[in-house]
Image: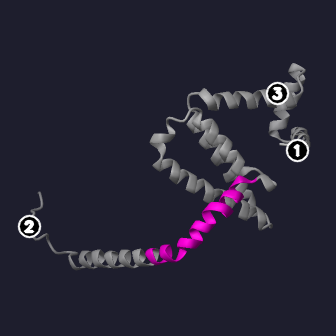
Amino acid sequence: MAAAEVKSYREKLEKYLYEKNAFTDLLATAEAKTGVKRVYIVYVLMSILFLYLAVGYGAAFLCNLIGFVYPAYASVKAIESERKEDDTQWLTYWVVYSVFGLAEFWFDILLFWIPFYYLLKCLFLLYCMAPGSYNGSEMIYQRIIRPFVLRHQDKVDRFIDQAGKRAKEALDTVLGTAMANVGNPPADGLKKES
């Protein structure tokens, strides 16, 4: 990353840390009591989080919490906003998150052996949440998921249609049999206990 970009991110972080909200109120209290600038307090907290994800107990839970809670909150805000772009951004994130979760399910036995897996996963999810041109979910969707789906869309649609028809036929058969047997005793002659 270029020095100008790092400086830009640092300036955005420092601007955010002085906005009025519950988190910055806690930081202001900590800053007043310790005499340490709030930006350094945040750097220490981020370092602790980084180390915990690398070696801590429950790193999987924390990683999944980070990858789910903020995006869910941002998705609700996007739904409630008038803008379409934020809806698209978070829908894209959830598509990538779902594909990643499915891949993670199938390759779990191999992922277990990767050192610092949950730290890497958390960094990947943060990359997928990143705002602007660094949004990883947009890049992954455009380069991998979208071409794959477009290539196989007709086959998948036909399969879903056929599966829906078969499920409806099966349900109709089961309901028809059940309705025909309502009130009739079972054929094997089971007796009611008195």
> Gap in Å between the C-alphas at discs 3 and 1?
22 Å
Q: Residue at x 86, y 31 (%)?
A: 39
The answer to whether any part of residue 79 appears in the image is: no
Q: Residue at x 56, y 72 (%)?
A: 151
> Which mark identifies residue 188?
2
Q: Nearer the viewer, residue 15 or 111?
A: 111
**Are the residues tagged 2 and 1 within 8 Å (C-beta)?**
no
The colouring scheme, among rainbow, by chain, secondary structure or one colour, is one colour
- Name the chief secondary structure element in magenta: helix
> Gap in Å between the C-alphas at discs 2 and 1?
78 Å
Q: Residue at x 75, y 57 (%)?
A: 77
The answer to whether any part of residue 180 appears in the image is: yes
Q: Amino acid at mark 1?
A: Glu
The quadrant of the rendering that contains the N terminus is top right
Return the residue at label 1. 5
The quadrant of the rendering that contains the C terminus is bottom left
- Determine if the magenta segment contains residue 143: yes
Question: Helix, strand or loop at disc 2?
Answer: loop
